[in-house]
Amino acid sequence: MLKFSRGGSRPPENGLSLDLWALRGNRMPPEAKIFGIGGIIPLLTGVVIVLAVREPFGIPVVRIILAYAALILAFLGGIHWGFASAALAGPALELDAPRILALSVLPALASGVGMLLPDAVAALFLAAAFASVLLLDRASEELGYTPFWWLTLRLRLTVAVVSLLLLLAIVDLTR
């Protein structure tokens, strides 16, 4: 099985390793930053629109923002499904992978629940769900299922998403 190496970690049993620290010069790939920030832009744009005008031309912008956030949350669960599936596909017995696989469906379930709630409550619920996914990120990182830069990226993006969802909830509650 191919595991991500974090520089000083022990060598894998089969001698096969991908040392991303050496390949990328100990930094996060710029593509990950660009696509991560790109995923925040629609959410930020929607919140700015809602701050200016609640429903321009009768368009339910708040619901659209919430649907987008729910979609991203479900996507994060899919990423963890992929991490765990890759671990299960390897030759080594991965006892923790089924647990990560099971937990990876929770973000998609939370997305569906979030879309059933009233706007302000949905924004708060989704903010809490995004923050909770960080626990799954941390567990996957500790098991070596993620690239070395994953948790750093996820923490930064989660702070942005949670802040925007909390702002959206405040705006919705005050109007």
Image (cartoon, rainbow, N blue to C red):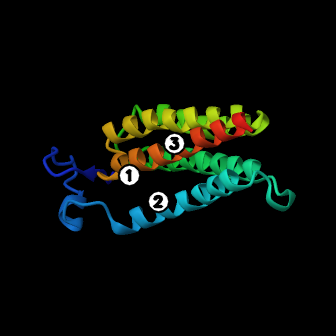
Instruction: Return the residue at label 2.
Output: 36
Q: Secondary structure at mark 1?
A: helix
Labelled pair 1, 2 in contact (Cβ < 8 Å): yes
- Left or right of 49? Residue 57 is right
Is residue 117 visible in the rendered image? The answer is yes
Q: Which mark is residue 153?
A: 1
Q: Which mark is residue 63?
A: none
Q: Amino acid at mark 3?
A: Ser
Graded by Cα atoms within 10 Å as few (under 14), some (14 to 19) or many (20 or more), the crowding at tag 2 reads some
- Left or right of 135? Residue 101 is right
Taking the spot 17% from the left edge, 63% from the top edge, the residue there is: 22
Taking the spot 45% from the left edge, 48% from the top edge, the residue there is: 83
Q: Is label 1 or label 3 in front? A: 3
Disc 1 or 2, which lies upstream in sequence? 2
Q: Amino acid at mark 1?
A: Leu
Disc 3 or 2, which lies upstream in sequence? 2
Position of residue 57 measured from the top left corner of the image (x, y, whole percent): 85, 62
Q: Secondary structure at mark 3?
A: helix
Position of residue 33 measured from the top left corner of the image (x, y, whole percent): 40, 62
